[in-house]
Amino acid sequence: MDIGLNMVAREASQGLSPGLDGLPRPMPPKAAKKPKKAVLFFEVEILDAKTREKLCFLDKATIAEIKNLFTKTHPQWYPARQSLRLDPKGKSLKDEDILQKLPVGTTATLYFRDLGAQISWVTVFLTEYAGPLFIYLLFYFRVPFLYGHKYDFTSSRHSVVHPTALQTVPTQSSTYPILSPHPLRATQPAHRPCLPRAPTRCRALCPSTLPTSVPVLPFQNCTYYWGFAAWMAYYINHPLYTPPTYGAQQVKLALAIFVICQLGNFSIHMALRDLRPAGSKTRKIPYPTKNPFTWLFLLVSCPNYTYEVGSWIGFAIMTQCLPVALFSLVGFTQMTIWAKGKHRSYLKEFRDYPPLRMPIVPFLL
């Protein structure tokens, strides 16, 4: 009995196992072990770009993660305030940059620069574009000290003035943007953000905020929007305002142009939003969708600007007001400059970009 057990044990050790009848049977082959993948760890040290003083030592792989960890050790420098770069005088690294793909060794040295206090673009948008809405309503309700005491809180006798107050809400909040198209709506999830209209240096450092040390941009934009809103509202709501020459027919035609262009503008921005998935920063060529308003993509690179100009043309025809016409002209000039810049960027980035497209005006400009 002992001999048999010893034999079974010996044979089992040679790759055999006892069966039901006590006889040895082959053991199943062992699965080959998969080779372990080599894991490469990165260590990051952050130095002050000016003093070269060591500020922090981290071990994360993406710039965004590094900024978040850096904030934990230095709470006064939140991520939007940080500029990390490979060289003290080099360009700031993007949050989506992956450390493994940067020209660094296993121990990377990043240089930190404080961008200063930041203000959110949402705050900038609301300040610049909510102001005109409030200003226009002051003139519409004719608050005291605007047109004289006898006109305080009176309403215009011309029917065309009343729909213009309703049009001001989508018009002031969506047309002629200096920072971003559809600014008030851009603060909502309906619009995946394009980079705001700001100096290149500000957009490169932090596209979601604006340094408070650069107050000129919000100030000049507020001056422009608020000033033009007051100028237009003063004449449209003035007691001596003269209605359109061709009466109701002119108003209806202009209102139809305005509504169509606003729907087109909204459709374009929805198409641009769907072009870029949430959380993605990849750039693609925009093409028309099943929505007929997006078919303008066949002819122009920036149909949102085309529709915005059309909205203001409709508003100018409807009110027959010189300040509105001048505002439309200035807006068209500025948006043409932006459209040409975007068109050149498309042509430079995409070799297969449709050659038939023009920047803003089909077949002309």
Image (spheres, rainbow, N blue to C red):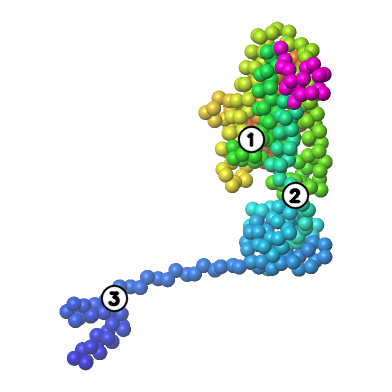
Which of the labelled discs sits on residue 27, or is there none?
A: 3
Part of the protein shown in magenta: 138-157
When the figure is inspected, residue 288 is found, relative to residue 78, above or below; the finding is above
Residue 174, image quadrant: top right
Q: CA distance from mark 3 to mark 1?
A: 69 Å
Of badges 3 and 1, nearer the viewer stands: 1
Question: In this figure, what is the number of numbered marks?
Answer: 3
Specify few, some or many for label 3: CA neighbours under 10 Å numbering under 14, 14-19, or 20 or more.
few
- Image location (x, y in percent) of residue 272: 60, 36
Q: Position of residue 142 (x, y in %)?
A: 76, 21
**How far apart in space, not on screen, are marks 1 and 2 (Cα)?**
22 Å
Q: Nearer the viewer, mark 2 or mark 3?
A: 2
User: Is 140 within the magenta?
Assistant: yes
Question: Compared to 208, does 174 lie above or below?
Answer: above
First of labels 1, 2 by sequence position: 2
What residue is disc 2 on?
118
Q: Is residue 291 magenta?
A: no
Mark 2 crowdedness (10 Å alpha carbons): few <14, some 14-19, many ≥20: some
Of callouts 2 and 3, the N-terminal one: 3
Considering depth in this image, is 293 or 9 the residue closer to the camera?
A: 293
Q: Which residue is mark 1?
A: 185
Q: Amino acid at mark 2?
A: Gln
* Left or right: 143 in relation to 181: right
